[in-house]
Image: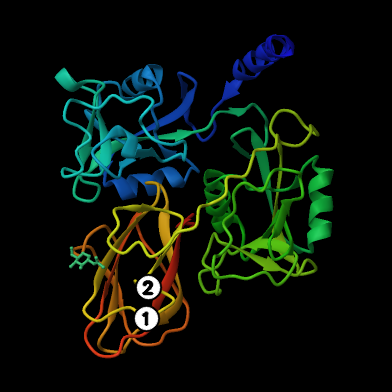
Amino acid sequence: MRFPILFSIFLPLVISISSDPVCTNGFTLVNNKCLKLFTTAASYKVAERSCMDYGATLVTVKNSNDNHAVSTIAGTSVALLWMGLYCFGSDPSRCQWDDSTGSADMYNSFAAGFPHIAVGKCVYYSTQGALAGKWLSGDCEKETKAYICELPITRADDCKYNYNGYCYTFHDVPTAFVQAQETCEKECGNLASVTSANENRYIATLSNRLFSGNFYIGGLWPSSNVFYWFDGSAWNYNNIDPSYSHNANCIAVSNSISSSVASGLWFSIKCHMPYSFVCKRPAGTKCSGNQPIVPVTPVPPTQSFCNSSLLLSPGVITSPNFPFSYDNSEFCSYQLATLGSYNVLLRFSDFATVKGVDFVNVYDGDSVNSKLLGTYTGQLDAFSLVSSGNTMLVTFKSGSGKPAQGFSARFTSYSYGR
Ligand SMILES: *[C@@H]1O[C@H](CO)[C@@H](O)[C@H](O)[C@H]1NC(C)=O
């Protein structure tokens, strides 16, 4: 009988928090969501990037109230709007929300016959006529539409960078880890933990504007597979460069295009190195406790995946039979994808094919008609590629002769910092 009592105690608390929601960045509170309408038509990719500049995603719709909120904010000025939903197959269960909350299986408002990925993998909302409130499939690159961006609700606070219930401060003064943490504690915070891809994207986008170099977050990496956040948050998300191995105890975020680690990715660094840093504290409620612990979900291991259907990041693809030799006259294709608001980072850790005979092609999109990122053959050192959208296609073709070992590559979601 304990549970019902706890429940009745917690319920009023939840109501008092949600009765005081605020939106930042000029977004409007509509039906418990922070939304902003952009009426200039853009491709899906451009619309995503525009939302990202606010740390936002394209609008997500989880119930009929949300669906109504989209019409409310669109008014009569626009007829069609991109939503933050990307379909990997012609079934709502294969459509994934951009805010990493899963598929559209629980709620959707697709018009009859949709989603239909032969028409397009992106999803748009119709505000007018017989299809008002309905969702349809559209071509992500060729079609342009108006769009709505969405930010999480936060709590009222006079801090400058207020996101999803937290205030962030950016200190562009190179400081060692311990002194940086002390500075954050004086602000009733800690060096920032980064516990979701959306939060990483928010910080990476701002840091590109506010910092001149790499910067500390509150992560510690004391030995090769031990990680934790200084503020006690669970280690349930990270954006460590997959090609980077542990060689020091603190974690920094790359903020430069020229360094060996791509912008927005994390790497290990000796804690006495002076870097810029980001602090974080709960908005509205200063000096409160740590965040709740969230269980870690392990990532399942993967194998060759030659010719398997669309693969959702993260995962590993290899040539057939790797680490043993592939055969002559083989052909494989690998379709890689991540959520609509992220990019694919593909890291080849091993690459050995017969030069001029066996080739790997990588395309910046989901077909061989997409832009070719490169053709690779021979013995190559490890290298990385990043897609401009949320899909990548890899093909492998062997000729005749004595085959080589082949390749192994890991693909991950990449939080594109600008
Ligand atoms: C992969 O698909 C292609 C074309 O559909 C086919 O030619 C090839 O044999 C397949 N590869 C393997 C290893 O099954």
- The quarter of the rendered structure image containing the N terminus is top right
Residue 389 as seen in the image, left or right of residue 246: left
Q: Quadrant of residue 292?
A: top right
Name the residue rendered at 43%, 29% in the picture: 35
What type is the residue that disc 1 sits on? Ser
| Position in image of residue 392 (x %, y %) | 32, 60
**Mark 2, residue position:** 321
- Front residue of this view, candidates 402 and 407: 402
* Residue 325 numbered mark, or none: 1
Establish whether ligand 1 lies closer than 8 Å to the Cβ of label 2. Answer: no
What type is the residue that disc 2 sits on? Asn
Discs 2, 1 touching: Cβ within 8 Å: yes
- Would you say residue 126 is visible in this rendering? yes
- Front residue of this view, candidates 43 and 398: 398
**For residue 90, above or below residue 346:** above
How many angstroms separate mark 2 from mark 1 (CA)?
A: 6 Å
| Position in image of residue 389 (x %, y %) | 34, 55
- Colour mode of the rendering: rainbow
| Position in image of residue 132 (x %, y %) | 22, 20
